[in-house]
Image: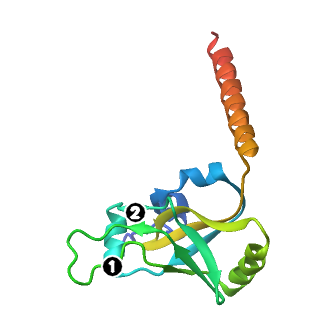
Amino acid sequence: MAKTKTLPNKASSNRPEERRKVVATNRKARYDYTILDVYEAGIALQGTEVKSLRAGHVSLNDAYGEVRDGEVWLRGLHIQEYDFGSWTNHEPRRVRKLLLHKSEIARLVGKTRETGHTLVPLSLYFSGGLCKVELALARGKAKHDKREAMAERDAKREAEQIVGRRIKGW
């Protein structure tokens, strides 16, 4: 009887956390904004932009999303020019189109018209070979909200340290 080789199930071997390679994160966004909803969007890129992203030459610091004419655009994203590019190199801060479903865009149009709501990119990553942006619908925090968040975080950290010491018997 001939032995057959069994292949692993693709669905089980391609878990999202294994396939996702984070290129850049916007750590300050969670500090400056209250995150209301998170969307995963594709991003339309040129060839040299992809190569530069894979090298990690990107900054999300000043980036924000904008809904205009039924499309979502990402402004202020800085992708450094590719070192080995030729005359076909891209502009570092060009406006890039985000790829979302029509229903998601319609929801974002309504939400961004409300005062104080904005679209903030949280992270940029490769998932299954495609570049994706984690886009958040957010509301800006006031200064006192930021202080409260810091105080909560410090209190939580301190409580975890006390519990850890008790478990260790200190």
Q: Which mark is residue 150?
A: none
Label number found at residue 58:
2
Outermost residue toward the bottom in this view: 69
Q: Position of residue 144 (x, y in %)?
A: 75, 42
Vertical placement of residue 112 versus 155, above or below = below
Which of the marked residues, 1 or 2, is nearer the chain's N terminus? 2
What residue is rendered at 55% in x and 51% in y?
27
| Figure colour scheme | rainbow
Q: Secondary structure at mark 1?
A: loop
Residue sitting at the far front: 143
**Residue 15 visible at all:** no
Q: Residues within 10 Å of mark 2 (few under 14, many from 20)?
A: many
Can residue 113 be seen at all in this image of the molecule?
yes
Check the picture and name the quadrant holding the C terminus: top right
Residue 32 image point, x, y percent: 64, 52
Q: Tell me the residue that label 1 is attached to.
A: 90
Residue for point 47% across, 64% down: 125
Is 55 displayed left or right of 128 in the figure?
left
The quadrant of the image that shows the N terminus is bottom left
Residue most toward the top? 170
Question: On the picture, is 11 further left or further right than 50?
Answer: right
Residue shown at 57% from the left, 74% from the top: 41
Mark 1 Cα within 10 Å, few/some/many (few <14, many 20+)?
some
Q: Secondary structure at mark 2?
A: strand
Real-space Cα separation, disc 1 to disc 2, in angstroms: 13 Å
Q: Nearer the viewer, residue 38 or 63?
A: 63
What's under tag 1, amino acid-wise?
His
Residue type, numbered disc 2: Val
